[in-house]
Image (spheres, rainbow, N blue to C red):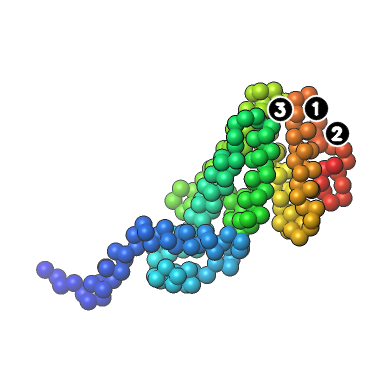
């Protein structure tokens, strides 16, 4: 029998510690650090050190920084989806739509770094490829109910939901980048939300522009 080399003997127990508990710890800590920070600010060495391990563990379990960011994006997607789902009370589609949109804004403001990971690009993982975003499901559900109940005019549900999201993302992105310290930021959002609901209301044949002009700051009036 070939004797085990001292080097191999010391390495095996180390890799044996790369378990789900360590993976979860790294992922949770990375998610916490990226809550309000850009992806490029995440350092792998200090992250690994915070979990009592080395960067080898991150490369072994996540495939490096790209794989780790993809895992954080999936985690953030699940968190946003849960927040949106929890905002629904199912008393009326109008109130659910308002509540969902306001929760979307609040989550983005409280998790700016994660928000960029969730909506910036399609979430991709090294093994699974592109991952369907879970956070879209509550929005699709509410839009589908609004069309079904005649609150929104008939149309393709996916197209309607995508258009509504585009408006939400636009006004939220402006708040994050331009209006963050403005006392009028919330009112800008509420004005845009009212315009969104009017533009898709049953009997409306056009967009928000039919109900008022768009100001120079980009918010529909």
Relative vertical location of residue 178 with respect to residue 5 in this rendering, above or below = above
Residue occupying the point 57% across, 38% down: 137
Residue 85 showing in the rendered view: yes
Residue 44: image location, x then y, percent:
49, 69
User: In front: 165, or 145?
Assistant: 145
Q: CA distance from mark 2 to mark 3?
A: 16 Å
Within 10 angstroms of label 1, few (less than 14), some, or many (20 or more) residues? few
- Secondary structure of the residue carrying numbered label 1: loop
The tag on residue 210 is 2
How far across and how far down the image is residue 76, in percent? 54, 52
Q: Earlier in the sequence, mark 1 or mark 2?
A: 1
State the quadrant of the C terminus. top right
Earlier in the chain: of badge 2 and badge 3, it is: 3
Q: Tell me if label 1 and label 2 are in contact, CB under 8 Å.
A: yes
Answer yes or no: is residue 133 visible.
no
Q: Disc 3 marks which residue? A: 152
At 22% across and 76% down in the image, what residue appears?
6
Q: Is residue 38 above or below residue 92?
A: below
Q: Which residue is mark 1?
A: 205
């Amino acid at each position: 029998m070939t004797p085990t080399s001292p080097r191999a003997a010391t390495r095996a127990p180390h890799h044996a510690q790369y378990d789900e508990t360590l993976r979860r710890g790294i992922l949770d800590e990375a998610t916490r650090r990226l809550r309000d920070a850009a992806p490029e600010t995440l350092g792998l060495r200090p992250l690994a050190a915070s979990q009592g391990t080395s960067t080898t563990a991150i490369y072994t379990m996540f495939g490096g920084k790209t794989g780790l960011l993809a895992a954080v994006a999936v985690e953030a997607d699940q968190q946003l989806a849960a927040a949106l789902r929890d905002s629904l009370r199912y008393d009326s589609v109008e109130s659910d739509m308002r509540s969902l949109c306001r929760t979307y804004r609040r989550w983005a403001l409280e998790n700016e770094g994660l928000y960029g990971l969730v909506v910036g690009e399609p979430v991709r993982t090294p093994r699974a490829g592109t991952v369907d975003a879970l956070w879209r499901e509550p929005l699709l559900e509410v839009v589908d109910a609004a069309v079904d109940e005649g609150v929104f005019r008939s149309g393709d549900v996916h197209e309607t939901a995508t258009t509504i999201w585009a408006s939400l993302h636009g006004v939220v992105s402006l708040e994050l980048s331009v209006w963050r310290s403005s006392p009028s930021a919330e009112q800008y959002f509420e004005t845009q939300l009212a315009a969104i609901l009017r533009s898709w209301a049953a009997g409306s044949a056009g967009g928000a522009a039919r109900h008022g002009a768009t100001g120079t700051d980009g918010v529909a009036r």
